Amino acid sequence: MKVAVLGAGAIGAYVGAALHRAGADVHLVARGPHLAAMRRHGVRVLSPRGDFTAHAHATDDPAEIGPVDFVLLGLKAHSYAACGPLIEPLLHDTTAVVAAQNGIPWWYFHRHGGPYDGHRVESVDPGGAVSAVLAPERAVGCVVYAATELQGPGVVRHLEGTRFSIGEPDRSVSERCLTFSEAMRAGGLKCPVEPGLRNDIWLKLLGNISFNPISALARATMRQMCLHGGTRQVIETMMRETLAVAGALGCEVGVSIERRLAGAERVGDHRTSTLQDLERGKPLELDVLLAAVVELAEITGVEVPTLRTVHAISDLLALRSAA
């Protein structure tokens, strides 16, 4: 199985290293000091499950790789519309794009069925710019439950979790999903094929939509947000509003808000990816988290006043940090 990891950051390099360890033909696409380090020393994974190093091919030129069976998309969602020149050399007629992203994906209503089938979510696919580059037919959804971070160039610290749930937009259990799942399991990762992957999307989003923007606004860790009474109440309200939107779209999360908060508190003083991006001067990935759900609330008629308020403030933060 030939796999390209487009955007081999913390998650992408971790998955690529695991797949390479299991014998897949893996190619990592990255740039800068991180790329240089992976070329010289491979990907070094530091994990409570055991450290290892994978010497997969690493490049900044996808044309060196050519067409592959799977592209694991490790880019931030706001980079998707501009990734055409990078992804085109990697595609053949049946190449699948496994999109490891947070929030509402651009393919969400592709083969969804019901009254919203085919609806485009403007916040994540403005003017169809993402769909023009990443055809929804190629998409395999992926919800990441693992936590990783780049400790340094070429060095990935795996903090917790090994689950990467995948699924088809049409809810089928396809051969391509089973093939990818088998390769992931061979690499030591959990990769269930979920016909109801949209439920997983909302479960992951329940935390991201609240903790990520609040962490950036307050410069706070997971534990700090959970232990501060007023902030915890705001997060609970955001979660309740998110569950209402999910329910209006026929999705069930299956985890209580109390359990979700307890899990977040156990993570400890972890900085969310949004806070890390803010500290590093990178664009904030909030459209697929907050703006998209506010948009979905509008089409379903669900009232989400707290989500709207936090979105307005965090959107201003994103604009100011990008200036």
Image: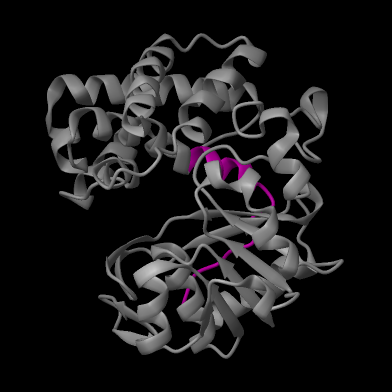
Q: Position of residue 107 (x, y in %)?
A: 70, 42
- Asked if residue 128 shows in the view, the reply is yes
Instruction: Specify the segment rendered in magenta.
Output: 188-203
Give the tally of numbered discs.
Answer: 0
Q: Based on the picture, tell me whether residue 136 belongs to the magenta stretch.
A: no
User: The N terminus is located in which quarter?
Assistant: bottom right
Residue positioned most to the right: 93
Q: Position of residue 35 (x, y in %)?
A: 42, 74
Q: Is residue 251 left or right of residue 50?
A: right
Q: Nearer the viewer, residue 58 or 70?
A: 58
Q: Is residue 35 left or right of residue 49?
A: right
- Asked if residue 170 shows in the view, the reply is no
Q: Position of residue 155 (x, y in %)?
A: 30, 75
| Vertical position of residue 240 compared to residue 146: above or below | above
Q: Is residue 190 left or right of residue 280?
A: right
Q: Position of residue 323 (x, y in %)?
A: 36, 29
| Vertical position of residue 108 compared to residue 6: above or below | above
Residue located at (81% from left, 22% from top):
115
| Vertical position of residue 49 compared to residue 202: above or below | below
Residue located at (69% from left, 41% from top):
130
Q: Nearer the viewer, residue 258 or 311?
A: 311
Residue located at (40% from left, 68% from top):
32
Q: Is residue 43 left or right of residue 288?
A: left
Q: Based on the picture, tell me whether residue 196 belongs to the magenta stretch.
A: yes
Specify how the rendered protein is coloured. one colour
Q: Quadrant of residue 42?
A: bottom left
